Amino acid sequence: MPRPGMMWRHVIVSTHRSWLHGDQRGFRSRGHRIHSSGDYKDPPPLGEHAELLAYQQKHLKGKKVKIAPALRGEVGLALLRAVLKAGYRVLVIAVTQKHAHLLVELPKSRKLVNQIVGKWKTARTTKLRRAMRGTIWGEGGKFKPVRNREHLRAAYKYVRDDQGAGAWVWDYRNGVPEEVQQLLARDAEPAGTSHPQAEGAAQRSPGFLGQR
């Protein structure tokens, strides 16, 4: 299971303007200063925060971001590189039109997790910088704690298998793509040396996940 001081989390981040404060699916602002009475599974009353949503739609800068199918792999590889470069273990990543899901081992501190994931959201590949200028991700995200092994298996299968036909998916059983390994090697000091996170990410099954 997790290393000392760490816990597995199901991280979900949404693209810019795809899930605003006041959204009918439910929302929570930073620090839970404002939040709806429901969520996407049990939506709040219709129009509960209609004025807040209208304000967000009028004043929030930038266009609504949707990740094209041809670019979802680039987004996923950028996230994978960022996670491994920072030294964290990750089991699976999925990227869809408006969201990214990561099952990753992170510190228990929610404040620290928000800072770490915030940095990952700035990651880009060269191709991505050319194709998607400006902000890709909205602020914050969901950092759901994984309670036990059964929950970890369920979260793993959900991210891997249930994100729709258009999703780009990577899981640790596939190993780290060569292009990511090369970039991590370039990041390492001294330049050109192997990167320990890249070598460790292609580990054998942790066992508690079971087989496909």
Image: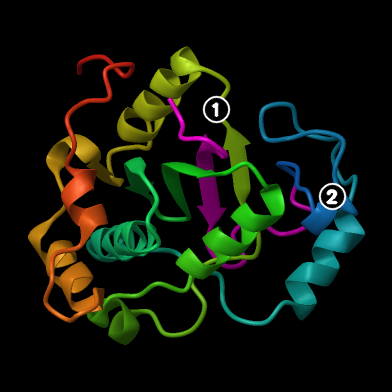
Residue under label 1: 146
Give the quadrant of residue 140: bottom right
Q: Which mark is residue 131?
A: none
Q: What residue is rendered at 85% in x and 46% in y?
A: 35
Looking at the rendered structure, the secondary structure element under dot 1 is: loop
Q: Earlier in the sequence, mark 1 or mark 2?
A: 2
Does the magenta portion include 69? no
Q: Is residue 104 left or right of residue 137?
A: left
Query: Between tags 1 and 2, which lies in front?
Result: 1
- Magenta residues, start to end: 1-23
Residue drawn at 15 percent across, 63 percent down: 181
Residue at 39% across, 20% down: 153
The residue sitting at 24% across, 77% down in the picture is 189
Q: Can residue 47 be seen in this view?
A: yes
Secondary element under disc 2, as helix, strand or loop, is helix
Color encoding of the figure:
rainbow
> As drawn, is 138 to the left or to the right of 72?
right
Q: Could you say which is closer to the camera, residue 178 or residue 99?
A: 178
Q: Which amino acid does label 1 sit on?
A: Val
Q: Where is residue 69 in the image (x, y as percent from the top left)?
A: 27, 58
Callout 1–callout 2 Cβ contact below 8 Å: no
- Magenta span dominant secondary structure: loop
Residue 93 higher or lower than 29, as above or below: above
> Distance from label 1 to label 2 (Cα)?
20 Å
Q: Which quadrant of the rendered structure holds the C terminus?
A: top left
Q: Residue 32 appears at what percent x and percent y?
A: 84, 50
- Where residue 116 appears, x then y in whole percent? 55, 61
Q: Name the residue under label 2.
A: 32
Residue 110 in the image: x percent, y percent?
A: 68, 48
Q: Does the magenta stretch include residue 20?
A: yes
**Amino acid, disc 2:** His
Which sits in the foreground, 16 or 92? 92
